[in-house]
Amino acid sequence: MKAYIFPGQGAQFVGMGKDLYENPLAKELFEKANEIIGFRISDIMFSGTDEELKQTNVTQPAIFLHSVILAKVLGNDFKPNMVAGHSLGEFSALVAAGALSFEDGLKLVIARANAMQKACELQPSTMAAILGLADEVVEKICAEIDEVVVAANYNCPGQLVISGSIAGIDLACEQLTAAGAKRALKLNVGGAFHSPLMEPARIELQQAIEATEIKAPICPIYQNVNPVANTNPEIIKANLITQLTGAVKWTQTVVQLLADGATDFVEVGPGNVLQGLVKKVNREVTTSSATV
């Protein structure tokens, strides 16, 4: 069974999607996106600078567009038995699987990026990657700290990203290193994504999600906050709303996909980060990048 997986923020690179633009359908979708966004995001993607591409209001729609347009161009070759996306990638997965229209998906991603940016500006906060400790140890230490600090991204066994206030992350890194973490590395991000500090963004995005039509996808989607097979539009909406303040359970997603029969994982979008994470869960499984 084929699982199609869609990357999140951090997978972007200058030149992404340029090879697709020659395809008439891709060109049409890129131009439609430029119109919706109000600036030529395709120019930044194809030939902008790293700095331009790093801005949240560019990064998130750029990764979404690369993933979704690639899936659309695959046409009849896009035959998923199941789909999943890492954080932002969940929106790409929903559009690719027919639950969201291209336009609605893009508008939600833009709203999400803007809401997250505003939440980041309200309170200085950050994230850190913790390597080489069991998830339970990280969770326990975070829970005992008298600051906002939570497990945010369960990327693969032995790699968990924590999120919270700057003081909370500093304290956690200190204590987790003392507890035996191989590394506790603060990340160069704008804020505490997937933590309670994103609550203002969640409230803002909730209205946009509730006003958007979501249909049953062509195959089950495994969502970040509750990684089980699902095709119910109401549950999909609820999970999308919770996602901003909830953890990205990617390790658990891969484990569940494997348990439900996934044998081939196809990454749709820029980079190959997710393939690496899948291999850390099960090195025997087949992984590849979607190509036209």
Image (cartoon, rainbow, N blue to C red):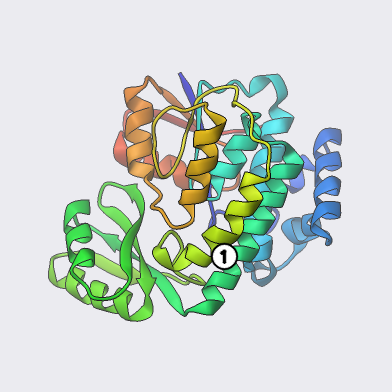
- Closer to us: 29 or 46: 29
Q: Amino acid at mark 1?
A: Met
Residue 260 placement: quadrant: top left
- Closer to us: 271 or 29: 29
Crowdedness of circle 1 by 10 Å Cα count: few (<14), some, many (20+)?
many
Q: Is residue 12 visible?
A: no
Residue occupying the far left of the picture: 179
In the image: residue 158, left or right of residue 200: left
- Relative to 14, say whether 227 is above or below: above
In the image: residue 128, left or right of residue 9: left
- Closer to us: 36 or 235: 235
Name the residue rendered at 43%, 75% in the picture. Answer: 125
- Closer to us: 9 or 240: 240
Image quadrant in which the N terminus is located: top left
Name the residue rendered at 41%, 44% in the picture. Answer: 225
Q: Which residue is mark 1?
A: 116
Image quadrant in which the C terminus is located: top right
In the image: residue 204, left or right of residue 42: left
Give residue 118's position: percent from left, percent from top. 59, 72
Name the residue rendered at 80%, 49% in the picture. Answer: 33
In the image: residue 177, left or right of residue 223: left
Give residue 285's position: percent from left, percent from top. 36, 28
- Relative to 206, say whether 74 is above or below: above
Q: Is residue 64 visible?
A: yes
Give residue 286's position: percent from left, percent from top. 42, 27
- Relative to 284, say whether 140 is above or below: below
Give residue 245's position: percent from left, percent from top. 44, 57
Name the residue rendered at 73%, 39% in the picture. Answer: 102
Helix, strand or loop at mark 1: helix
